């Protein structure tokens, strides 16, 4: 556990628990990481009291792990009450900012982000960055990453690292920021440093993320399994099971994905991510009615644009076009809501505009996004928007940027294939359509069937290889020149006797 600067750290206040008749005191020290903090409760060796909700939430997110919804709510209430009476307590403001960030993650409600920003800024007012308020600085980086403002996230993370290079809490922020910016080598270097400084749940989750982005699927699964083994609380375990389900889904194994998603829901029934994943897997397995139910339940708990798009596509594939359009309209409204709270939703909104709105507007939006974040996700979206707008040659350049760094995505491969087909390169289109369907034939209820249709329309290459590699005339075995026989070597000549030498005695002479 990192050492906190004790000279500049104010004493941590007691944590109170709502609904109990007896108040329980526990002093905490906080380190904020990736939207989380590290809590060190002041307990004596013989204190066997179980941790209460606030302590559980603080400890979980302090280790870079998710926390239970009820525990986070208790932590928010506790810290809000404390800072109202102690407005200069920079540590508690940092705790409160972290709790708001966890609420935003659990609920997908972007209204928590401005609250988190205000709390973290209050912490920095009480103790500025130049005086070593690393907790709030790390929290500001985590907040920026959550809003998909990865450039700002990188600045905060690098500032923390410059002041305290061995402080492990800076590195989850840096991994997320570098990934969002498309600096995958930088993300890998930060991940390796994190593993060296603090192996555990947060490090293994980031390692799995980095390996996945590089296309190292087996390594990604192994790292996430290590994260699952490191999980302590049910919310932590459920999150790692959900991520294992995502990895199984991306490699085209909906049955294994369903098993992991259902495991996550059994462990944490309130997890909306696992329910959305289960809906995706059920749709792939032909259980559309159950999938629609789960999608609607997940959207009711976490209304995010990505889920609205998935539900809309499922409805469209089932021939329910009017209901699908309602989901697409909801997607646009959610993206506007997120933008009002500082969230960058240009990628999902750009894809929506390319497919269902104005492709030219999508190109403008995503071109601006590319200037800020050169990730494979932005490259893929911009390439698709350019294709929809009719600029196929430029679209191919961005499709290559999306597919060549290593991430194995059926969606990316499909987009590139359709661009290549529009350019008349059927061989390349066939290769990438086969890659998309081999990677995950269920990647989209709309585009998956279109990929199969396109592959059937292109057909198989002619027998014997591509036409430009076939000989123009039948092959005839050439007449090779016969080798000339070498003359036999002459026998070696016998040496002549030397008349001056003594003659050998005859056998009879020797007797």
Image: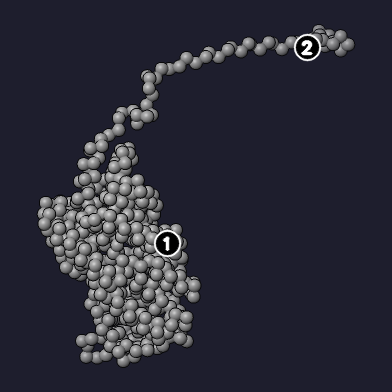
- Between disc 1 and disc 2, the foreground one is 1
Say which residue appears at 63% left-offset and 11% top-offset. 488
Asked if 35 appears above or below 505 in the picture, the reply is: below
**The quarter of the displayed image where residue 19 is located:** bottom left
Find residue 405 and report its horizontal and vertical position in percent. Answer: 39, 52
Of 313 and 489, which appears nearest the observer? 313
Say which residue appears at 35% left-offset and 64% top-offset. 205
In the image: residue 227, left or right of residue 357? right
Considering the numbered disc 1 on the image, is that residue within a helix, a strand or a loop?
A: helix
In the image: residue 83, left or right of residue 294? right
Q: Which residue corresponds to mark 1? A: 187
Say which residue appears at 38% left-offset and 20% top-offset. 473
Residue 476 appears anywhere in the view: yes
Find residue 451 and report its horizontal and vertical position in percent. Answer: 24, 45
Give neighbour class at mark 1: few <14, some 14-19, many 20+ (Cα, 10 Å): many
In the image: residue 437, left or right of residue 34? left
Asked if 285 appears above or below 371 in the picture, the reply is: above
**The quarter of the displayed image where residue 75 is located:** bottom left
For the C terminus, give its image quadrant.
Answer: top right
For the N terminus, give its image quadrant.
Answer: bottom left
Considering the numbered disc 2 on the image, is that residue within a helix, a strand or a loop?
A: loop
Q: Which residue corresponds to mark 2? A: 495
Kindly report the distance in space between the C-alpha atoms of the residues bearing marks 1 and 2.
84 Å
């Amino acid at each position: 556990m990192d050492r906190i600067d004790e000279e500049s750290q104010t004493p941590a206040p007691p944590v109170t628990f709502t609904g109990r008749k007896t108040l329980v005191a526990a002093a905490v020290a906080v380190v904020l990481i990736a939207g989380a903090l590290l809590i060190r409760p002041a307990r004596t060796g013989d204190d066997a009291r179980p941790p209460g909700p606030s302590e559980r939430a603080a400890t979980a997110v302090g280790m870079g792990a998710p926390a239970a919804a009820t525990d986070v709510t208790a932590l928010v209430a506790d810290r809000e009450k404390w800072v109202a009476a102690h407005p200069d307590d920079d540590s508690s403001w940092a705790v409160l900012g972290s709790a708001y960030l966890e609420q935003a993650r659990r609920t997908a409600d972007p209204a928590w982000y401005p609250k988190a920003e205000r709390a973290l800024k209050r912490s920095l007012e009480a103790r500025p960055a130049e005086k070593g308020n690393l907790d709030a600085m790390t929290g500001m980086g985590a907040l920026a990453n959550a809003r998909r403002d990865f450039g700002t996230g990188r600045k905060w993370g690098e500032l923390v690292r410059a002041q305290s290079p061995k402080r492990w809490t800076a590195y989850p922020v840096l991994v997320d920021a570098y990934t969002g910016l498309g600096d995958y080598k930088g993300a890998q270097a930060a991940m390796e440093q994190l593993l060296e400084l603090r192996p555990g749940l947060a490090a293994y989750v980031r390692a799995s993320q980095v390996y996945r982005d590089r296309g190292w699927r087996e390594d990604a699964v192994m790292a996430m399994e290590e994260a699952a083994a490191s999980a302590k609380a049910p919310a932590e375990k459920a999150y790692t099971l959900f991520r294992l389900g995502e990895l199984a889904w991306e490699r085209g194994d909906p049955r294994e994905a369903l098993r992991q998603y259902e495991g996550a829901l059994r462990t944490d029934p309130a997890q909306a991510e696992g329910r959305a994943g289960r809906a995706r897997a059920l749709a792939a397995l032909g259980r559309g009615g159950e999938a629609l139910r789960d999608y609607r339940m997940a959207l009711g708990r976490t209304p995010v644009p990505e889920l609205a798009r998935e539900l809309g596509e499922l409805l469209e594939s089932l021939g329910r076009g009017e209901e699908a359009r309602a989901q697409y309209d909801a997607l646009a409204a959610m993206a506007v809501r997120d933008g009002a709270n500082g969230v960058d939703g240009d990628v999902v909104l750009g894809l929506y505009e390319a497919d269902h709105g104005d492709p030219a507007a999508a190109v403008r939006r995503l071109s601006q996004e590319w200037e800020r974040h050169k990730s494979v996700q932005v490259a893929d979206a911009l390439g698709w928007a350019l294709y929809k707008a009719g600029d196929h040659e430029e679209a191919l350049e961005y499709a290559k940027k999306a597919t060549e760094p290593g991430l194995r995505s059926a969606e990316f491969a499909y987009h590139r294939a359709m661009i290549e087909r529009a350019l008349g390169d059927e061989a390349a289109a066939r290769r990438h359509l086969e890659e998309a369907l081999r990677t995950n034939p269920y990647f989209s209820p709309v585009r998956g069937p279109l990929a199969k249709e396109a592959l059937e329309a292109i057909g198989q290459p002619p027998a014997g290889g591509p036409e430009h590699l076939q000989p123009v005339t039948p092959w005839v075995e050439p007449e090779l020149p016969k080798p000339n026989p070498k003359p036999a070597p002459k026998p070696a000549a016998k040496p002549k006797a030397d008349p001056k030498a003594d003659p050998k005695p005859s056998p009879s002479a020797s007797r």
